[in-house]
Image (cartoon, grey):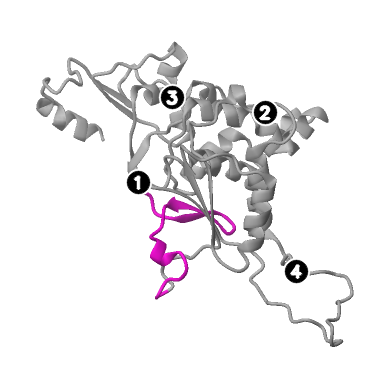
């Protein structure tokens, strides 16, 4: 399970909290939230009226809302024009988490009540504290978290993938459909990128790297500060590994399939940064004990 942490001002990502702590924390050690967005497979896309109502009611009591989970939104059936549900909820979250005034605030002259007095206005905290959550803290909520991180930081999809993990130390699990969807929505989530290209400023906008098209949505899992556990797909995407700061690979039973230039850049020919343990299959039968010392020495 992944611990709750702040990924943008007043927006947090983490596991579904205990209902007993949603309203208050006895020692203030557990953050409390005004709006809790649960990502799950059965959720439908909230419309604009629902978002408006939840936002207004969050000033009087904590509110909950659901959003479709990672992998549940098909890019082929996603609306190509008109209202974009993913961008809409990102804009809504950002407005509530960063706004400077309450819905009641107004620059107009105060309206007097029946007795000629100025009615009392309740003083609420202006910025809403919002939690994006699911059971384990990352599996179902990855799509919305990545989309919001792109929107809030104004960065392209590949930077969001790396920075959410490497800088914010968040684990997440996306699907190939999430990669396709977020890539196709990049110009909506971060319109400045599309505008820069139209103005001819292509040098200021880096194109999505090749590793993005070769990834399945997931990243290797960090098990120690200096060590990751990944699959063959990760090992065969060396540009992704370098972008994550990984510079050595230990492959057990599965040979990597790299180009000549990739092999030369990693020092594979002299076994400097890559160790391959062959004649061992992941079948529960082949022994690995004899290879432990060589593996540990390499690590």
- Whichever of labels 1 and 2 marks the residue nearer the N terminus, that label is 2
Give me the residue at 46% from left, 15% from top: 261
Residue sticking out furthest to the top: 260
- Whichever of labels 3 and 1 marks the residue nearer the N terminus, that label is 1
Residue marked by disc 4: 104
Magenta-colored span = 1-27
Residue marked by disc 1: 225
Residue sticking out furthest to the right: 109
- How packed mark 3 is, by other alpha carbons closer than 10 Å (few <14, some 14-19, many 20 or more), is many
Label 3: which secondary element: helix
Residue marked by disc 3: 238
Residue 280 as seen in the image, left or right of residue 14? left
- Whichever of labels 2 and 3 marks the residue nearer the N terminus, that label is 2
- Whichever of labels 4 and 2 marks the residue nearer the N terminus, that label is 2
Q: Which quarter of the image is occupied by the C terminus? A: top left
- How packed mark 2 is, by other alpha carbons closer than 10 Å (few <14, some 14-19, many 20 or more), is few
* Quadrant hosting residue 76: top right
Is residue 132 found inside the magenta-colored segment of the image? no
Coordinates of residue 140 in the picture (x, y in percent): 45, 40
The CA distance from mark 1 to mark 4 is 47 Å
Coordinates of residue 66 in the picture (x, y in percent): 52, 47
The CA distance from mark 4 to mark 2 is 34 Å
- Whichever of labels 1 and 4 marks the residue nearer the N terminus, that label is 4
Q: Contact, CB < 8 Å: mark 4 with mark 3?
A: no
Give me the residue at 61% from left, 24% from top: 77
Residue marked by disc 2: 79
């Amino acid at each position: 399970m992944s611990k709750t942490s702040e990924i943008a001002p007043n927006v947090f990502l983490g596991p579904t909290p205990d209902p007993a702590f949603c309203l208050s924390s006895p020692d203030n050690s557990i953050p409390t939230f005004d709006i809790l967005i649960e990502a799950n497979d059965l959720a439908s896309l909230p419309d604009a009226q629902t978002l408006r109502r939840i936002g207004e009611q969050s000033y009087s009591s904590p509110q909950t809302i659901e959003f479709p989970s990672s992998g549940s939104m098909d890019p082929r059936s996603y609306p190509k024009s008109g209202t974009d549900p993913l961008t809409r909820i990102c804009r809504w979250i950002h407005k509530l988490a960063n706004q400077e005034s309450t819905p009641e605030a107004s620059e107009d002259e105060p309206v007097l009540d029946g007795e000629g007095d100025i009615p009392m206005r309740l003083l609420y905290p202006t910025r809403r504290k919002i939690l994006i959550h699911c059971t384990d803290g990352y599996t179902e909520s990855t799509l919305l978290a990545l989309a919001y991180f792109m929107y809030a930081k104004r960065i392209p999809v590949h930077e969001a993938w790396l920075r959410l993990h490497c800088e914010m130390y968040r684990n997440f699990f996306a699907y190939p459909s999430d990669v396709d969807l977020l890539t196709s929505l990049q110009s909506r989530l971060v319109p400045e990128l599309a505008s820069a290209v139209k103005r001819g400023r292509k040098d200021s906008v880096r194109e999505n790297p090749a590793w993005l098209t070769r990834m399945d949505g997931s990243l290797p899992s960090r098990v120690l500060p200096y060590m990751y556990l990944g699959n063959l797909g990760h090992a065969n995407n060396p540009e992704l590994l370098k972008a994550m700061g990984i510079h050595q690979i230990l492959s057990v039973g599965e040979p990597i399939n790299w180009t000549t230039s990739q092999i030369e850049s990693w020092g594979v020919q002299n076994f400097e940064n890559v160790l391959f343990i062959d004649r061992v299959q992941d079948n529960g039968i082949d022994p690995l004990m004899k290879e432990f010392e060589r593996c540990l020495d390499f690590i």
